[in-house]
C-alpha cells in the first residue's frame, strides 16, 4: 500500500504546486525531520560532514533531485495509477536493461 501511495501523494501535491517546487519541498521536509530527530535524540553533535565529502554529497544530491523532479513531472503528465505501475516496474526495467 505504501509503494502505491507515493504517486497518489504526488498527484495530490501537484494540485497545489508545480512539479519542481514539490520536489525540493520534499527534500526540505525530509531534512527538517531528520535534523529534528537527530537533535531530539542527541545525535546532532555527531553529525559532521568532512570537507572531502562535500563534492560527492553535492553530486549525489543533484542526481537524486533530478530523479525526484523527473518523477514529479512524469506523474503530472499521467494518472497516479499509471505512475504507480511504471514506478514499481523498476525490477523488470533493471533486468531488461
Image (spheres, rainbow, N blue to C red):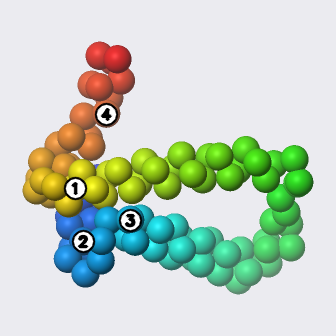
User: Which residue position holds label 1?
Assistant: 75
In 3D space, how far apart are the residues under numbered discs 2 and 3 (Cα atoms)?
10 Å
Q: Determine if residue 2 is in view.
A: no
Tell me the quadrant of the picture where the C terminus can be found: top left
Q: Secondary structure at mark 4?
A: helix
Q: Are marks 4 and 3 in contact (CB under 8 Å)?
A: no
Q: Nearer the viewer, residue 65 or 94?
A: 65
State if disc 2 and disc 1 touch (CB < 8 Å): yes
The secondary structure type at the circle numbered 1 is helix
Tell which tag, 1 or 3, sits nearer the viewer: 3
Q: Position of residue 72 (x, y in %)?
A: 30, 58
Q: How far is mark 4 from mark 3, CA to CA?
A: 22 Å
Residue 94 in the image: above or below residue 82: above
Label 4 or label 3, whichever comes before in sequence order = 3
* Mark 2 surroundings within 10 Å by alpha-carbon count, few (fewer than 14), some (14 through 19), many (20 or more): some
Q: Are marks 1 and 3 in contact (CB under 8 Å)?
A: no
Contact flag, marks 4 and 1 (Cβ < 8 Å): no
Mark 4 or mark 1: whose residue is earlier in sequence: 1
Per the image, the residue denoted by label 3 is: 20
Q: How many marks?
A: 4
The residue sitting at the top extreme is 96
How dense is the environment of label 1, judged by Cα within 10 Å: few (below 14), some, or many (20 and up)? many
Distance between the alpha carbons at the discs numbered 4 and 1: 15 Å
Q: CA distance from mark 1 to mark 3?
A: 12 Å
40 on left or right of 13? right
Residue 17 pos. (x, y %): 29, 77
Identity of the residue drawn at 59% across and 78% down: 32
User: What residue did someone put label 4 on?
Assistant: 90
Which residue is more in the foreground, 88 or 70? 70
**Left or right of residue 49, residue 16 in this image:** left
Image disc number at residue 14? 2
Q: Could you tell me which residue is drawn at 60 percent across and 71 percent down?
A: 31
Amino acid at each position: 500500500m505504501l509503494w502505491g501511495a507515493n504517486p497518489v501523494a504526488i498527484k495530490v501535491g501537484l494540485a497545489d504546486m508545480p512539479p519542481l517546487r514539490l520536489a525540493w519541498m520534499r527534500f526540505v521536509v525530509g531534512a527538517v525531520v531528520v535534523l529534528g530527530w537527530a537533535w531530539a535524540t542527541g545525535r546532532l553533535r555527531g553529525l559532521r560532514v568532512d570537507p572531502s565529502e562535500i563534492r560527492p554529497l553535492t553530486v549525489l544530491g543533484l542526481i537524486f533531485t533530478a530523479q525526484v523532479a523527473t518523477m514529479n513531472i512524469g506523474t503530472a503528465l499521467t494518472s497516479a495509477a499509471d505512475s504507480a505501475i511504471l514506478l514499481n516496474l523498476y525490477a523488470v526495467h533493471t533486468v531488461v536493461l
